[in-house]
Amino acid sequence: MLSIAPMLELTDRHFRYLARLLTKETLLYTEMITTGAILHNKPEKFLEYNKEEHPIALQLAGSSPQDLAKCAKIGEDFGYDEINLNCGCPSERVQSGMFGACLMNKPALVAECINEMQNAVKIPVSVKTRIGIDNNDSFEFFLNFVETIAETGCKYFIIHARKAWLKGLSPKENRTIPPLNYETVFKLKGIHPNWNVVINGGVKNLDEARELLKKVNGVMIGRAAYETPLILAGEKPPTPADIIEKYLPYAETQFKKGVPPNIITRHLMGLFHGMPGAKKYRSLLSKPDFSTLHSIIGRQQLCT
Ligand SMILES: Cc1cc2nc3c(=O)[nH]c(=O)nc-3n(C[C@H](O)[C@H](O)[C@H](O)COP(=O)(O)O)c2cc1C
């Protein structure tokens, strides 16, 4: 199974709508949404999505079992297909709220959170984690973390196959500097062949994903899916014009609802990655209106 990673400020509902035009079955994750955001605001502000996005998973960030259970239930009532708990984000802001990767030091608390979440909903609950944090990077540390959670019955783990440094590296550096270590994930799958193990980190295209799927249950793609979305369409990808033509009615509806144009069109930039004239299209998309989108479709048709 293939999925697109939760990515703050990238995988919003507009990107997910675009992704769904390129791939039908891939599971799409929301951006990380904190329990506080859901419980202290109108939940629809953060949870609304387009019905076309299914299957879609809601990623929650938090560490209060009760709040997470409430938010999981709200997510289920909104129709999400899965609830995921973020135990992988290393940002300082997240650490001060005691959620994300720092939770790897608190396996019993995470197990309690997952237990309460599972009791609150019928849909699957999953955990997204790293393989270690700071100097807690032994296989035993990682295994103890996931096995403690698995005692609740949750055997569904999405594993970003690198550790995170909680201090000293920015979130961006934490996605490149600690080396990828797929072997740790394969080893876990070897020990627990019946678990649902999804590997994440550094996957560039569907060919790489297919290779990994021989060893694990699922592959999650993050940056490559956003930066080069046409890879999602497989061997005979559509042209950017084909996709923009399908996206245009959606964009128009969203504009009419008052969504600023650039919020919607910014996600289209990746369609032109590596193509002649990509820079020009990107600059057109940075000051978008409908005629821009129509003219891109026109130009692209001329080119094909
Ligand atoms: C801009 C950006 C934002 C991200 N936000 C989240 C997030 O909200 N929750 C999360 O679990 N991971 C987040 N991640 C990490 C990705 O989900 C993924 O684990 C990471 O990018 C490694 O996968 P990749 O090499 O395929 O990109 C983010 C990554 C990026 C690039």
Image (cartoon, helix red, strand yellow):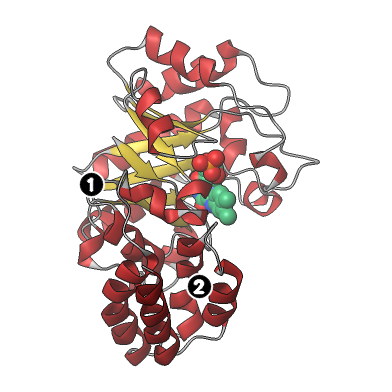
Label 1, residues with CA under 10 Å away: few <14, some 14-19, many ≥20? some
- Indicate the amino acid at tag 1: Glu
Image height of 26 relative to 154, above or below? below
Q: Secondary structure at mark 2?
A: helix
Residue 200 visible in image = yes
Q: Is residue 62 visible?
A: no
Residue that appears at 39% across and 33% down: 207
Residue 221 relative to residue 17: left or right: right
Q: Earlier in the sequence, mark 1 or mark 2?
A: 1
Residue 225, given in percent of the width and then of the height, sits at 45, 50
**Quadrant including the N terminus:** top left
- Secondary structure type for disc 1: loop
**Disc 2: CA contacts within 10 A as few (<14), some (14-19) or many (>=20):** some
Who is closer to the viewer here, 213 or 93?
Answer: 213
> Residue 244 placed where, x, y %?
35, 73
In the displayed orientation, state which residue is furthest to the right.
Answer: 168
Residue 195, picture quadrant: top left
Residue at 48 percent of width and 77 percent of height = 263
Q: Nearer the viewer, residue 179 or 106?
A: 179
The part of the image, by quadrant, that contains residue 128 is: top left
Q: Dot 2 corresponds to which residue?
A: 266
Position of residue 38 measured from the top left corner of the image (x, y, whole percent): 41, 64
Going by the numbered disc 2, the residue's amino acid type is Arg
Q: How many marks are shown on the rendered structure?
A: 2
Residue furthest out toward the top: 191
Residue that numbered label 1 is attached to: 25
